Amino acid sequence: MTDAPLPLGVDKQDIVFLYPESALLELFPELTVPVITVNIKASGNVDELYAKLQQKLIENGISTGQFYNMAEQNKFERNMLLIINVFSFGFIALISLIAAANVFNTISTNISLRRREFAMLESIGMTRKGLYKMLNYECLLYGIKSLIYGMPVALLVTYAIYRVVNNGFAADFYIPAASVVIAVFSVFAVVFATMFYAAGKLKKNSLVETLKNENV
């Protein structure tokens, strides 16, 4: 397939056979009324030109039932696509913020509840650097485990959506690699950012007071 521009009204979604006008009666001998197909490319005020042409057709007794303004149709499709993108990205952003808040709350609460455990580890010789290294390994395990469960489910849902959409028009299934990379990076970014925030709060705790406090 070449990269040459396609004729107006022809796209890559459908199979279209183009014949010369001279072959019209040969292919469709039952036609008694001549069929005229005209594609007009215009610039400037397309709506005004469309209205004038439509008026001329009406004045000459020609039906305007098959007279379309492709510029207006394309504008409508672009507006619909924009609306869909705004709602889609808004919904994705909302779900992402809720998920990030849940992760932040879960990890920070978990580290806060383990303050006495961390104090005991420090009392037997674990350095603050070793404690942070242990928390880093835990966050790494959290991120890997969430991806092990989440990625297969996401791929299955993506394929299910593709199967539904494919009933309307033909399309190839592909995995959005850029979106997958962004998702993986976001998971580890949220997990480690939460750990750094919670670990920073541990610096303010007194080792002796934390060990004495049995409610921690």
Image (spheres, rainbow, N blue to C red):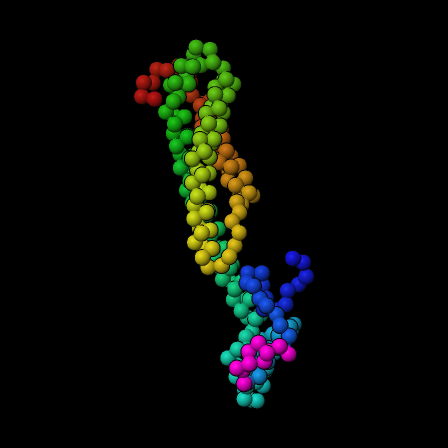
Q: Is residue 72 left or right of residue 195?
A: right
Q: Residue at left 54%, top 39%?
A: 181
Per the image, is 24 magenta? yes
In the rendered image, the vertical position of residue 197 relative to residue 209, given as above or below = below
In the rendered image, residue 158, in percent from the top left (x then y), is placed at 46, 47
Q: Is residue 55 visible?
A: no
Say which quarter of the image contains residue 5: bottom right
Given residues 144 and 21, the one toward you in this image is: 21
In the rendered image, residue 172, in percent from the top left (x then y), is placed at 53, 51
Q: Residue at left 38%, top 22%?
A: 114
Q: Residue furthest top?
A: 124
Given residues 160 and 22, the one toward you in this image is: 22
In the rendered image, the vertical position of residue 156 relative to residue 86, given as above or below = above
Per the image, is 33 magenta? no
In the rendered image, residue 92, in percent from the top left (x then y), is placed at 46, 47
Q: Which residues are magenta?
A: 22-32
Say which quarter of the image contains residue 17: bottom right
The quarter of the picture where the N terminus appears is: bottom right
In the rendered image, residue 169, in percent from the top left (x then y), is placed at 49, 59
Say which quarter of the image contains residue 206: top left
The quarter of the picture where the C terminus appears is: top left
Q: Residue at left 64%, top 79%?
A: 22
Q: Is residue 142 visible?
A: yes
Given residues 13 and 49, the one toward you in this image is: 13
Q: Residue at left 52%, top 54%?
A: 171
Q: Residue furthest bottom?
A: 60
